Image: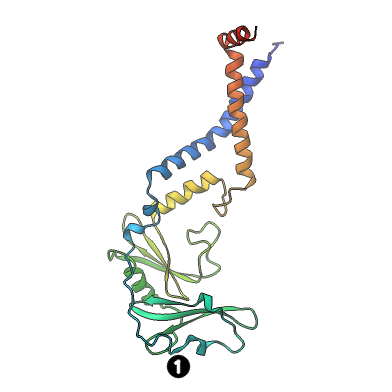
Amino acid sequence: MVRRNYKHYIRRTHRYLGLCIGIQFIFWTVGGLYFSWTKIEEVRSEQVRAKQAPVPLPPDLLPENLSPLNHLPSGASADLATFRIVNILGEAHYFLPYTTAAGEEGSILVRFRDGERRGPISESEAKEVAKGSMTETPTIGAVELIENDGVSKHHEYRGAPLPAYAVTFEGPEDYTVYVSVNDHQVKAVRSNTWRIFDLLWMLHTMDFEGRDNFNNYLLRAFSIFGIVTIMSGFLLFFVSSKRLRWMIYKLGR
């Protein structure tokens, strides 16, 4: 029977902990390298986003007969703090969210010029809005209407207003512009650079659902295992180094 000393068990513990933690350390390191070498402006596709020109408004701003309040459903309430003026294909519109007496949420979109209320954005309008939001005019490859039940926690448009049109352009980056159906505005632009960032960010935070939860138990556990692995490595170095132990012995005398 082979008699094993404490060095054997320390070495074995360190080896298996290193194997377990090492894979996640690779993900953390690769993610850190990608984050540090990739400009956040490129991740957000800011270099291809066109700056929207200001829309000139008539001097008689918000005349009574054109007020979006005229279109509120009976019994509905609106918080004027959420009222804003939006640019839709070069025209100014009033946008006002509201809540019905039954608790259902809705919104009003009224054209400033004539007080006409606009309905949900059409596919053709969504294409024009998406193309107008880019510095260039790439070829549209696909258009998809995403409903409320079409976005999971892993979707690249998660947590954003729905329904929305996903307008994807052809090209090496596969830019997808998401246009909200309700207020006709671009809510997000996704690209292959962003998708790689999102994947590495998920592996970095170890939140495989929402990506941004730093308090998940898996990350906590691996962080603790990582500290234990490092400490076992220091301990293994100490018990394996005769010279170091001899120096400590000399200093202690």
For the rendered model, the colour scheme is rainbow
Toward the right, the furthest residue is 1
Residue 30: image location, x then y, percent: 45, 39
Residue at 49% x, 78% y is 83
> What's under tag 1, amino acid-wise?
Asn
Q: Quadrant of the N terminus?
A: top right
Q: Quadrant of the C terminus?
A: top right
Does residue 162 lie above or below 152 as drawn? below
Task: Count the labels in the image.
Answer: 1
Does residue 157 lie above or below 243 as drawn? below
Q: Nearer the viewer, residue 161 or 57?
A: 57
The kind of secondary structure element at disc 1 is helix
Residue 180: which quarter of the image? bottom left
Residue at 53% x, 79% y is 80
- 222 lies left or right of 67: right
Residue at 64% x, 83% y is 101
Residue 8: image location, x then y, percent: 64, 17
Residue at 32% x, 70% y is 132
The residue indicated by pointer 1 is: 65
Does residue 155 lie above or below 61 as drawn? above
